[in-house]
Amino acid sequence: MVQRLWPSSMAGRLLLTIALALLAGQLLNTALLVRGQREGALDRVAAEASVRLIAATDRLDEGLPLRERLLGRIGRAPGARFRRTELTPVSPIGQGMEPMPDLVSRLDAVLPSYGVNYARIEAASMAAPQRPRRVDRLAAEIGGRSSESVRLLAVVALQRPDGQWLSVRVPVGEASNRILATIAVQTVVLYLVMLVPLVWLTRRIGRSLGTLREGVAHFERTQEATPIEPSGPSDLADLTRSFNAMSARIAALLGEKDVMLGAIGHDLKTPLAALRVRVESVPDDRQRERMVASIDDITRTLDDILSLARIGRTGDAPEPVNLGALAEMIVDEFRDLGNEVDLADCPRIVVPLQLTWIRRALRNIIGNAVRYGARARVGIAQVPGRVSITIDDDGPGIPDDQIERMFEPFTRLEASRNMATGGTGLGLTLARAILHQHGGSLRLENRRGPSGAVEGLRAVLTLPVG
Amino acid sequence: MTDPVHILLIDDEPTLREPLAEYLTGQGFAVTEASDAAKARTLMRDQRFSILLLDIMMPGEDGLSLCRHVAAQSETPVILLTAKGEAMDRIIGLEIGADDYVVKPFDPRELVARIKTVLRRAARVPQPAEDEVQGFEFDGWTLDTVKRRLTDPDGALVPISTAEFKLLQVFCEHAGHVLNRDQLLDLAHGREAHLFDRAIDNQISRLRKKVEADNRSPRLIKTVWGGGYTLAARVRRLASQDAP
């Protein structure tokens, strides 16, 4: 679930991270503001309560009656009608009121220094008594004010030394919802202001990265160094420049390798050709034939090594080829040499491939089958997306733990067997490399009968179609 | 007795050039050696050669360049000697006017056979007319005689053996004519080929498998009772400008 919501692209991740961080910041900000507002309200309540308690205490101490002056600013302040100062024999704070210890501690810090003596002090909050709505409306019309928003009253009561309870009621200003709305708007504005340049920036970086990625893929495919124009932020541009330098160097190395292999091929084949001509003057037929066979062996090995090094470096583009006709042609070649090769009928399958290379891979594998497995059966089958060519033989197979090793260059299962039959030890290596180059695969497996005994080896070549 | 065939052998490597010249002389050819393209050009100004054997990779002017020059200036046939067996080289070699190529290291007897085949073709065929032909088209199929390949009506390559290719080429060149087995053997493989009539039947059967929709009732390569075979299709010759 989390993985599904988490975007995969860099731009998406960056944007989501920043949005989440911004949201967290704004939430913290809101919490702090609400808390600050609540503290401020408490401070105002404490200030009013202490002023009125000090004034009332002074009057009582001087023997004057309690009288609330509702003049001046306090008289006009919202909630004036809730203000009341009373002297009662018991504390007006009863059950069902919410104690306000913060207010008590604030008053405790102030009152004694103004000469107010008390035995106990209590504070609690209570709901403000609501007036009937009609009166409320009338009051609003007369006073020209909107209806007051006082819903909560703080009651502070202190027990004077004579045992009487002096209490004041103070309206508590409520945290307005306006602040939340302000913060919400602020957040949206911040998002918009930040998102626009961020989207622009991430798209720019994304574009640079995309160009680089395409360049890498192109190089991987063609092994040609095509420099990419550095773009985007400096570290990305540096990366692009480094990639350009690297691909140029790899291309140069590959080019050198080709030139070197070409030179080796030429330099070895010319003396081989000279040797091949001179061999004709050897009078002993058997000797001459053996020498010719040796020269042919060297030539084959040399060709295989050169081919292996050149795979993927030839410029031939894949062409649509009738695979059935190709298999038929190769099977005919082996039949002409006296080998027993069967080819199952197959529908017309056209596959884009490099003809000379695939022909070579098929020749190598069918050659192995007739060499080690006495006879070969070739079948072609098409499944969605790919075509597979199966070559079965009736030979002894290969021990299962040795199969993978057969694809390594110059690997021979048994030296003795291979000596007698020839072969360069590169045939399978080359065939697999050719199929990989085509996006296909080559695997070997032992064919087992119902009793589990090995009946022969099976080679399966697969090639992608279309 | 006609004049001996005079070969100009051009290769920078004396280790190959000298024994090869010796061998070819032993086979009854007159051989002149040249160690590079410049010497070969000088020699060709003064003498006429029956055929050139030309190494591709040489210091200075390479074999391909000299081959192009020779093909443009004269009708002397050229056989290229190449160290590489890659398809690209074959195509380039034949497209720039070489008549054939052998890949090093070659069987010298094979080389002699190629020399004789090329000389026979050069003597028989009126060069200019034949040079124009780049391939044939019949019933949607294309036989490209430069790149030596067969393409089916849907544009897919149909790999065929050299023998089948030559046979099909002969059919295209003699479209509508009935060719008996002897004529087919002669035209496709030359007089020296030690092939039997059965071999031709076998090749025809393989060719039919590839080009016929139903090879039990062939529509293109028809058997003529008592006579031989014929290609029963309209054949169009492709010149260089409309080659595929």
Image: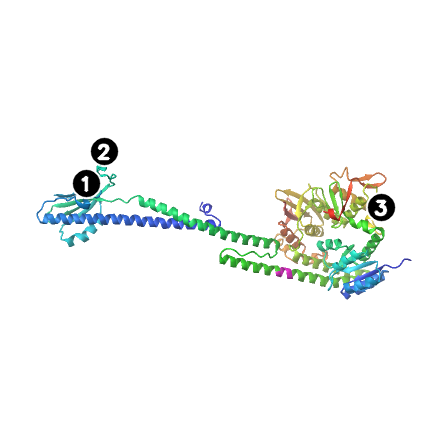
Q: Position of residue A258 (x, y in %)?
A: 66, 60
Q: How is the image coloured?
A: rainbow
The answer to whether A457 appears left or right of B187 in the picture is: left
Are discs 2 and 3 both within one chain? no
Instruction: Give, as a three-letter code, the residue at label 1.
Output: Arg
> In this view of the protein, which residue sits in the foreground, A378 or B182?
B182
Name which of mark 1 and mark 2 comes first in the sequence: 1
> Residue A81, which numbered label?
1
- Please identify the dominant SS of the magenta region: helix
Q: Are marks 2 and 3 in contact (CB under 8 Å)?
A: no
CA gap between label 1 and label 2 equals 16 Å
Q: Residues within 10 Å of mark 3 (few under 14, many from 20)?
A: some
Kindly identify which residue carries mark 3: B183
> Residue A463, which numbered label?
none
Could you tell me which secondary element the residue under label 3 belongs to? helix
CA gap between label 3 and label 1 equals 131 Å
Q: Position of residue B95 (x, y in %)?
A: 75, 53
